[in-house]
Amino acid sequence: MNDNQRDENNLERQQDLRQDEETFRLRQEENRLGKAQRSGIYYWIVNTIYWLGGIIEILLMLRFVLRLSGANTQNEFAIFINNLSAPFIAPFSTLFISPTSNSGGNIFDLNIIIAIIAYAILSYLLISLVRFIFYNRV
């Protein structure tokens, strides 16, 4: 083998090495971009669950306070809160008989407390499930 052939072989090897390095860097960058995208989706899902769970909890707490304080059931705000929270309390509405005082004006609605606890646990479980799904990917 002469020197020209060796130089050509060395040049080809160097080009192959550069190409392999570029391919490796490209794959690393694609992996980083994929992880960033999955991370963004993960945080969006978790934040959405927190927001929805929080809104439901606030609605149910408002309903509980209104019923406990004996708020006027004909008041527009009370009607609005009751109508908005009705679908979330429906599965629990007949679970317990709620104790009353002041001739039935103030109602300690235990069903709402159970619903608040149930939705808090459900939110926690959903977030745990999302974390489990994304655990190896984020």
Image: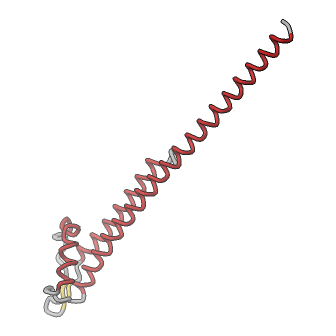
Looking at the image, residue 119 lies above or below residue 28: below
Looking at the image, residue 47 lies above or below residue 25: below
Looking at the image, residue 125 lies above or below residue 24: below
Q: Quadrant of the N terminus?
A: top right
Query: Percent position (x, y) of residue 65?
Result: 27, 84
The residue positioned 56% from the left and 41% from the top of the image is 31
When asked about the image quadrant of residue 29, the answer is top right
Badge count: 0
The residue positioned 46% from the left and 57% from the top of the image is 43
Residue 98 located left or right of residue 118: left
Query: Percent position (x, y) of residue 87?
Result: 19, 67
Query: Percent position (x, y) of residue 16?
Result: 69, 23
The residue positioned 24% from the left and 86% from the top of the image is 68
The residue positioned 23% from the left and 83% from the top of the image is 108
The colour mode here is secondary structure
Foreground residue among 85 and 69: 85
When asked about the image quadrant of residue 88, the answer is bottom left
Query: Percent position (x, y) of residue 91?
Result: 19, 65
Foreground residue among 110 and 54: 54
Residue that extends furthest to the front in the rendered view of this protein: 4
Looking at the image, residue 47 lies above or below residue 60: above
Residue 81 located left or right of residue 17: left
Residue that extends furthest to the bottom in the rendered view of this protein: 102
Residue 50 located left or right of residue 115: right
When asked about the image quadrant of residue 50, the answer is bottom left
Residue that extends furthest to the right in the rendered view of this protein: 3
